[in-house]
Every structure is written in structure tokens, then in C-alpha cells.
Image (cartoon, rainbow, N blue to C red):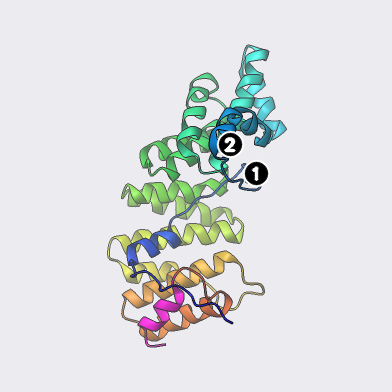
Amino acid sequence: MKATRAPRPERDPEAERAKIEGRTLDVWIDEGDVRQEAKGAAARATGVTRRRRDTKPLDPAIAAEITHASADHRRAERLVERLAEAQSALDRERLDEARRLVAPLLKEVPGVAAVHEIAGLVGYRLGRWRDAVRELEAAHALHPRVELLPVLADSYRALRRWDEVERIWTTIREVSPSQDVLAEARIVAAGAHADRGDLTGALRTMATVTAKPKRVRDYHLRQWYVLGDLNDRAGNTLEATRWFELVAHEDAEFVDVVTRLRSLGR
């Protein structure tokens, strides 16, 4: 017997848009398997041991950079371990813990880009936009990585610093990054236009998105959904339907695409 799905909750357009247009991008972090937090007194008693066992070692290049930046070799080992723990906490969405772990490293090894990267990503996920901007800008100045730029642009977008969003969008296009990074940056740039009520500009930013890639990936679905949403908001019902149908054809469970199509009479 086919299982019956529970009724969908009442639609919240802003929340749906945030799911698609928001971004969390782990650059040097190895996400690994997300393990459930242990429960009960026994788990609490062994919490530190378990955390250390689950913590993956840092990239050797990052560890070497921290060692070089620290005058005390023994202290450097502890800093490497601490950053690995902060990385693990971020992987598992223990954001307050990650923030607490990385904070001292910002003072002790401020010249290590990876420290600023993880601090910036934590700030971003916590919605601390100014913290995210400060640390991601510092990371980029020390070791430019185009993969971080969409996160930085989205942080500026949250602060309504439109010129900075446009500057970063221009930079990303000039360096010709991977298609997934370009797609994420495009979504942020279009979202910045839409935030200001400029749906025409938002659609123009998304205009180069193809409907027929050789292989459909997640970033294609995200872009198609954004195009469906923008066209729906602009009153372009047929175009909105076309893009939402592309998403639904590949993944009917993607956000609320089925509900969006029903609202358009499909």
C-alpha cells in the first residue's frame, strides 16, 4: 500500500526563497559523515573523547602554516588540534562551539587564511554578517579563493551593500570559476536585484542559465527554481511554469516546487 504523505505546511515564500538563495559553502573543510550527537550520561561522560576521535586532521598544508606562524612548536600542535575541532564542529552545525574554538586562533595566528575562513563561515551560518564579511575578506586577502566569494557576496547582500555585491559578481565572472561557483554567485547577484524590487535586473542576471545541460546537477535545479520564482513574481506565468516544471521533472521533492506549480494551475 502506498504511503500517504502528510499535508504540506502553509507556504512561506520568504523562507522558501531563503533556502534557495541562501548559501553555505565549505571550501577547505572535509564534511565527512554527519554523526548524531550521543545522548545520556554515558555519552556526556565520554563527550571529549568522542569529539576528538571524530575530528579529522587538517590539511597538512594548513597545519604546516600554523606551525610556521607559531613560535612555540608544542603550542602549535594544540592550535592545529583546536582548528581541526572547530572544523568538525562546523561540519556538524555546532556553530556556537565552532565560534568559541576558533576565536583564540584569530589572535594567535592571524596570518593563517584557513582560520579566517572557518571564522567567516561560522559567522555566515549564524547570520552575523559583519563578522562574516570581516573574516572572509581577511581570508581572501591572505589567500584568494574564488570559491569563498559567493559567500562573501551574500553576506554583503544581507547588509544591503549592493555595490560590494556587484563588485564581487564582476570579479567572479572575470576569473571564470567552476560552474557551481558561478551559479551560486549568479543567484546571489540576482537576489540582490530582487531585494531592491528590480525583477527585470534579476531576470537579466539569470538570462544565461541553460535549460538543457548535459548532466543536471543541484546547482541547475537551484537556478531553475530561482528563475521560476522570479518569473512568478514578475507575472510571467508561462515562463515560471516552464522553469518549475524543469525542476519537478528532475526532483519533485525540491523545496516546494509541486506546490508552486499547483499555484500556477499545473
**Direction front: furthest residue:** 41
Q: Which residues are magenta?
A: 256-266
Nearer-the-camera pick, 67 or 166: 67
The quadrant in which the C terminus is found is: bottom left
Query: Do the residues under discs 2 and 1 have CB atoms within 8 angstroms?
Result: yes
Q: Amino acid at mark 2?
A: Gln
Tell me the residue at 67%/13% (across/down): 74
Q: Is residue 265 magenta?
A: yes
Nearer-the-camera pick, 88 or 179: 88
Q: Which mark is residue 30?
A: 1
- How crowded pointer 1 is (Cα within 10 Å; few <14, some 14-19, many 20+) is rated as some
Q: Is residue 191 above or below residue 261?
A: above
N-terminal of the pair, mark 2 or mark 1, is 1
Q: Which residue is mark 2?
A: 87
**Location of residue 85 in the rendering, given as x and y in whole percent from the top left corner:** 59, 31
Q: Is residue 137 magenta?
A: no
In the shown orientation, is residue 263 left or right of residue 72?
Answer: left
In the shown orientation, is residue 111 left or right of residue 258?
Answer: right
Give the structural element (helix, strand or loop) at label 2: helix
Nearer-the-camera pick, 24 or 116: 24
Tell me the residue at 58%/28% (across/down): 45
**Location of residue 258 in the rendering, given as x and y in whole percent from the top left corner:** 45, 78
Give the structural element (helix, strand or loop) at label 1: loop
The quadrant in which the N terminus is found is: bottom right
**Direction top: furthest residue:** 72
Q: Main secondary structure of the magenta part?
A: helix
**Residue 94 visible:** yes
**Direction left: furthest residue:** 197
**Location of residue 60 in the rendering, given as x and y in whole percent from the top left corner:** 72, 32
Q: Is residue 110 above or below residue 157?
A: above
> Quadrant of residue 230 in the image?
bottom left
